Amino acid sequence: MWSALLVIALSAYMLGNINGAFCVSQLVAGEDVRKHGSGNAGLTNFFRNYGGWGTAMVVAVDVAKTVLACYVGKLILKPFGFGMEGAMLGAVAVTLGHDFPALLGFKGGKGILCGWSAALVLDWRLSIAMLAVFLVAFALTRYVSLGSLLGAVTCAIWFAVFYHDVPWFMAGGVCLGVLAIWMHKSNIVRLVKGTESKVHLIHRDLNKK
């Protein structure tokens, strides 16, 4: 079983290295999205600098790799009676690969889209709750980071409350939420200082390039 755990962790981590924002920026502009804006290889930074259909492609890549990692993990550990835990291991590993991709110098995204995509597989009710929290926060403030942070908090609390009787599954879910919060630490500082940038879906800030 240990070999199965290793296979899940490594394969999911390598899937995480397939960063949507980086790959699509190379495809549509022949450049690295991390050289612009916040320097982050995430969906928000991609949208601010490129927008358009490329953003949908980024979403497709990151959602697909996360869902695949979860299902592979579930498939491998299901014969051992730990299908849920296998899916969670895949979710955590693919998110770590997205946040800290070895193939990209350990400088990736912040994992919010990965966390939400994992929720689709792990507990679809959570995915709805996270999306609702994000949309309300974004609609009221235009801060993507605030919506993302509140979505991450929702994730951690959800697993702590509803899965406290499944220790490893709960721990993985809380880890996903806490990791996302940690990755947004610089955004938290800017939100507190009132210097965080807002995102407008129609009129992008072209000076971010």
Image: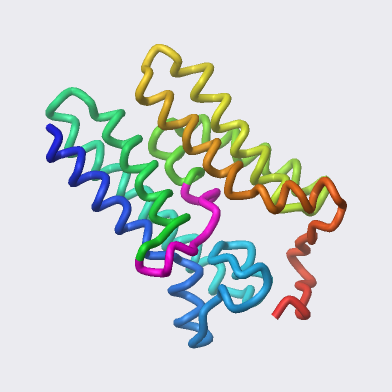
Residue depicted at 76% across the width and 79% down the height? 206
Q: Position of residue 62 (x, y in %)?
A: 44, 58
Magenta includes 209?
Answer: no
| Count of numbered tags | 0
| Camera-nearest residue between 27 and 111 | 111
Please, is residue 193 above or below residue 123 in the view?
A: below
**Horizontal arrangement in the rendering, residue 142 relative to residue 4 (left or right):** right
Please, is residue 36 above or below residue 125 in the view?
A: below
Q: Where is residue 197 in the image (x, y as percent from the top left)?
A: 79, 61
Residue depicted at 68% across the width and 73% down the height? 37
Residue depicted at 46% across the width and 81% down the height? 26
**Horizontal arrangement in the rendering, residue 62 relative to residue 196 (left or right):** left
**Horizontal arrangement in the rendering, residue 26 relative to residue 167 (left or right):** right
Residue depicted at 30% across the width and 50% down the height? 12
Q: Quadrant of the N terminus?
A: top left
Residue lying at the far bottom in this picture: please name it: 30
Q: Which colour scheme is used?
A: rainbow
Q: Where is residue 198 in the image (x, y as percent from the top left)?
A: 79, 59
Magenta includes 113?
Answer: yes
Residue lying at the far right in this picture: please name it: 194
Which range of residues does the magenta coloring cover? 103-114
Q: In which quarter of the image is the C terminus?
A: bottom right
| Camera-nearest residue between 38 and 144 | 38
Q: Where is residue 179 in the image (x, y as percent from the top left)?
A: 52, 41
